[in-house]
Amino acid sequence: MNHRQKIPNYDLEEFRYLHRGLSDPSDFGYSNLSADKKIEGFEMYSTQGVVEQLNPVRSKFFRLGFTVSGSVEVKIGLETFKHQSGTINLTHPNQIFSLGKRTSDFFGYYLLFDSNFMNEVIPYLSLFEDFPYFSISGTPFFKLNTPELNQTLSLFKAIDTELKDGRQFLKKNIQLYVYLILNEAKRSYLRQDLLNQSRLTTSDRIISTFLKLVGKHIPDKRNVADYAEMMSISANHLNRIIKDGTARTASDYIKEMLLLDASEQLQYTTKTIAQISDRLGFSEPSAFSRFFKQAKKVTPKNYRGNL
């Protein structure tokens, strides 16, 4: 029997204190909103008052954000994206993400909702089937043109008005506004032909899918052969495609994702190093410590102590 504990997976309530500072000067969305007007499983706020940097963390909810000005670097699993003016991002539960390199003029909006929030409008599984940016082969970051950005902003402001008014049918109206935002993003996605992967080479598609799968399945799948089987290709072929396309090996990416997972557990949990080592599938804690020190130039114990 597998007794390994899952890494922490933050819900909306827990995540609020990781992403936003104690001092919140904004009055948009949930910022300084009275508790009786808040809806379970949903949250919305501007970037005013969020932390400058967020180390790797995993969350239980869908995230939708768009940038009006400035930029910030976001890492989803092993892929790095730049959030800049006009960019929208749409990501789903259980992804490891982090942010940093934020410019002083960075400003935008976030909308978060958990897996059950939209059930009355669209079933959970249909979110992945109907909205291609949530799929394993989807593009989670893309640019909106000016009319699309203005329409999305108007929908966010409509939700803000609903929250402040707190009138009848509040939850239902907000669910419908969220659905409209998701559809507006889908319109842009289709307009830009992001669904059509034919513009990518076969190698590009394999690399992109591999990186997403590693981000999703670490640490339960640690071998290149595991991912090759999921992609219906041989391990040798997968290794060759990754090496030729990125100058790194498939194993390098698996190790990088393990390191992200380990760093998150050391920072956000009270698990012992032995427990973390076991969770990540190392034969013994000393092997985990050697792996971590080789990559980070510091032992797991000292890494945790320096946070």
Image: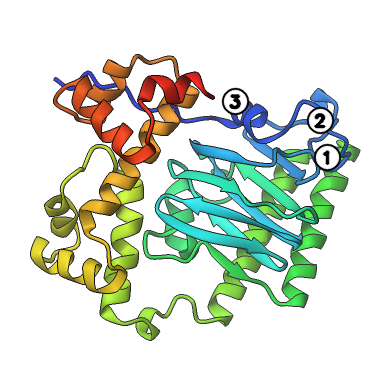
- Give residue 260's position: percent from left, percent from top: 39, 40
Kindly identify which residue carries mark 3.
14
What label does residue 37 carry, if any? 2
Residue 12 tag number: none
Mark 2 and mark 1: Cα distance apart in space? 6 Å
Q: How is the image coloured?
A: rainbow
Q: Is residue 221 left or right of residue 128?
A: left
Check disc 1 and report the residue beneath it: 163
Rendered position, 268 above or below 136: above
Residue 114 shows in this picture: no
Measured from the top left, where is residue 97 in percent x and y? Answer: 50, 45
Quadrant in the rendering for residue 285: top left
Q: Name the residue nearer the viewer: 48 or 166.
A: 48
Relative to the observer, which residue lies in front, 244 or 26? 244
Q: Quadrant of residue 283?
A: top left
Which amino acid type is marked by label 3?
Glu
Residue sitting at x 35%, y 26% = 299
User: What residue is at 48 percent from the left and 54 percent from the top?
Assistant: 127
Q: Quadrant of the N terminus?
A: top left
